[in-house]
Image: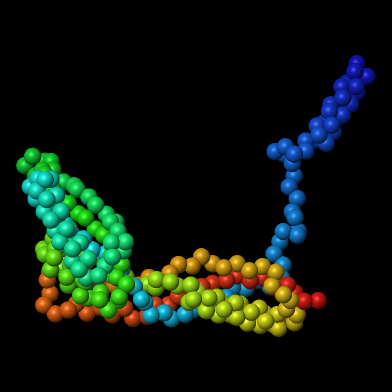
Amino acid sequence: MKKFWLVAVSLVLMLAVVGFSGCTGGPTTIDTVDINSQQSGIWVSGTGKVAVTPDIAILSLGIEAQADTVAQAQAQAATAMDAVMAALADSGVADKDIQTRYFSIYQVTRWDDYKDEPVVTGYRVTNMVTAKIRDVEQAGPVIDAVAVAGGDYTRINNISFSVDDPTPYYEEARQEAMADARAKAEQLADLAGIGLGKPTYISEGTVYPPVVYRDAGMEMVAPAPTTPISPGEIELTLTVQVAYAIAD
C-alpha cells in the first residue's frame, strides 16, 4: 500500500512540473519588464506664442419665425432667410463662404394646469448659418445689412475672428517652441552636472487656427449707426516635446 501511494505522489509531482514548464504564451505567462522601453535622457516641453491680427470674421446668424401652423412659420422663415442671403451677397460674401449649420422645426407648448398636460401654442422654425467675412472691416456693415433684411426674425448668435492661413505664423511659433525646449534642457543639464546631447525624440502638439469669439447678441433689429466691431489680436500657441540624450 505504501508503494502505491509513493508512485501516485511521484506521478502528481511530475505532472505539476510538466504543466508549469509547458504553460508558455498563455494567459498565465509572467510578464517581464523591458528596461529599454523606459524613458531616458532629458525630456522637456517647449512653447511658442505669436500675436496675430485676424484677417477673417466668422458671423453666426440666421432667422427664427413662430406661427400657429408649420406652414405659416416655414413661409415666414423662408422669406426672411431669402432676404438675409441676398443681403450677404450684396455685402460681398461669396456663396462658398456661407454654410448652413442648424435648421429645425418644433412645437411650442405651454403647460395647462387645468388639463394637467402640455398644450401646443404654435410652431417655431430656426435656420442658422455661418458667414465668413474676408474683409474684417466690413463685419459691422454686414451685421447691419443682415439686421435690416431679416427684421424682427433676425438672430445673430456671435462673431469670431481667426486667420485664413496660419501656416507662416506656426512656422514662427515652432521656432520659438524649439528654442524654449532647448533652453530648458540646457538648464536642467547644467543643474544636474551632465552634458546635453542631441535630440532623440521630437513631438509637436495638436494645433488649431486661433479663434476669438465676441457675443453679438441673440436678437438684432435695424440699428441707425454702424455696428462697431473690433477684432483686436489673437495669440497663436504651439507646443513641442523634445527628448535630449545625455552626452558622454
Where the N terminus falls, by quadrant? Answer: top right
Q: Which residue: 84% across, 31% down?
A: 18
Vertical position of residue 135 compared to residue 18: above or below: below
Tell me where residue 159 appears, x and y as whole percent. Answer: 28, 70
Q: Which residue: 53% across, 76% down?
A: 171
* Residue 47 visible in image: no
The residue sitting at the top extreme is 1
Q: Which residue: 69% across, 72% down?
A: 199
Tell me where residue 25 appears, x and y as whole percent. Answer: 75, 39
Vertical position of residue 2 compared to residue 232: above or below: above
User: Of residues 70 and 87, which is closer to you in this image?
Assistant: 87
Q: Which residue: 25% across, 70% down?
A: 92
Q: Is residue 185 left or right of residue 113?
A: right
Q: Is residue 226 left or right of residue 43?
A: left
Tell me where residue 177 appears, x and y as whole percent. Answer: 56, 77
Q: Is residue 132 left or right of residue 52?
A: left
Tell me where residue 136 appears, x and y as whole percent. Answer: 30, 76
Question: Which of the 4 image quarters holds residue 13?
Answer: top right
Question: Which of the 4 image quarters holds residue 215?
Answer: bottom left
* Residue 174 visible in image: yes
Where the C terminus falls, by quadrant? Answer: bottom right
Q: How many marks?
A: 0
User: Of residues 4 and 235, which is closer to you in this image?
Assistant: 235
User: Of residues 3 and 79, which is closer to you in this image?
Assistant: 79
Which scheme is used to colour this image of the protein? rainbow
